[in-house]
Amino acid sequence: MTLHPSLWELFSTWLLMGIQSFGGGSSTLIMIHEACQKHGWLDDEEFVRLWALVQIAPGINLVKFTLLIGRKLRGWPGLAAAGAGLLLPSALVTVLMTAGFTIVQSQPLVQAAMRGVLPAAIGLTLAMGVQMAQPLMTRAYHEGPPRLAVHLLILAAAALLMAVNGVSPVVVMLGAGAAAVLLLAVIQARRVPPQPDEDESSLSGDDL
Amino acid sequence: MNPLQFFWLFLKASLFSFGGLGNLPFLHSDLIGLGWAHESDFVTAIAVGQVSPGPTGLWSISLGYLTYGWLGAVLALVALSLPPLLILVVSAFYQRIEHNSQVQDFVRGLALGIVGLTVTVALNLASSSIFDWGGVVIALAALALAVTRKLPIILILVLAAAAGLLLYGR
């Protein structure tokens, strides 16, 4: 389907979606899906394919997804329009909220409230880690105990290495990637003789 | 502070991140190491990022503002806007690497690595924002509510603020 929305339409659609998603972007993906259906911009199969693709490149998933869809619909100007719609207003509100906070932060009541909010932010950070790990662990579980063990080992090793002072997170990440390639290859070779079975599409909700 | 170096640190963090808080471990290790940010800046920025509109990943814009004012916010925004463009390169090669199991395993390893890093950094940050059992309970309750998706994030934070007022107000 090749409809050609105007640049303004792209910009305003993503602006509305970005600005409506107070409390993080978990609802944004659903809104993008609805918009794509409503305007016939992407069919479901393409939507799922692009979202899976987004998982293997760096950066914020919703931003990558937005750029891909924008470019698909209207080329580079479309990419810029959708990306600016998603990012600029939301970024501005984020800065204004931060600035507002720095003004009131010395108020006793604000400080009391923050003593509740900041621990909650720690909990939410951990929750994001759990949500990222969930689909990976579920898949590993179905692949059998040895591969699940490798997954747990790599996760624990990364956490422990990071706890050692002075280890660069870049080294930890690349090490985790390399370890996964090596260990999972070894185990796969032992488990099943050549059998091209990989194909449960990787659309797990993942994080945003 | 050097604006170019500041920009580079945010850019690097974004280049190595996958998803929302993926850039946290990198920024934490670099900015704390240089003495450019306090632990409390990180926790505040994460909280603002969770409340404010747009992807959670915009939290680093808040961090940029807290550590380097408006310039920091703009640099952080540009730094997180550029790496996603690599998706265009990836999409061009997608057909070829889609079914390569080594590529898939590497990506899995990266994801596992980032989860491990995030857990450790979150525990580090806890030392600057959790001072008593009340804080521990709030953190665990937020974790449980978020993981089970019982409540929207914003409501969890509103409840946490109310708990803070009740426990520590006056």
Image (cartoon, rainbow, N blue to C red):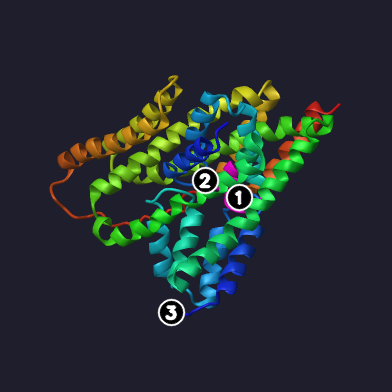
Give the structural element (helix, strand or loop) at label 3: loop
- Region in magenta: B52-61
Among the 4 quarters of the image, the one containing residue A119: top right
* SS under mark 2: loop
- Residue at the (55%, 42%) spot, across then down: B147
Give the secondary structure at mark 1: loop
What residue do we see at 49% from left, 69% from top?
A77
Cα separation between marks 1 and 2: 9 Å
Residue A187 percent coordinates (x, y): 20, 38
Location of mark 3 (residue): A2
Q: Are marks 3 and 1 on the same chain?
A: yes
Q: Is residue A139 above or below residue A154?
A: below
Q: Position of residue B101 (x, y in %)?
A: 24, 49
Disc 2: CA contacts within 10 A as few (<14), some (14-19) or many (>=20):
many
Amino acid bearing label 3:
Thr
Residue B22: percent from left, percent from top:
48, 41
Q: Which residue is mark 2?
A: B20
Position above or below: B170 against A13: above
Residue at (59, 73) in percent of width and height: A9
* Mark 1 residue type: Gly
* Residue B56 is a magenta residue: yes
| Residue A18 on image: x %, y % | 61, 59
Alpha-carbon distance for marks 2 and 3?
Answer: 31 Å
Chain containing the residue with disc 1: A
Contact (CB < 8 A) between labels 1 and 2? yes
> Residue shown at 33%/36% (left/top)?
A174
Left or right placement of residue A95 versus residue A31 in this view: right
Q: Which mark is residue A107?
A: none
3 and 1 marks in contact (CB < 8 Å): no
Tell me the number on the disc at residue A24: 1
- Let me know if residue B39 appears in the view: yes
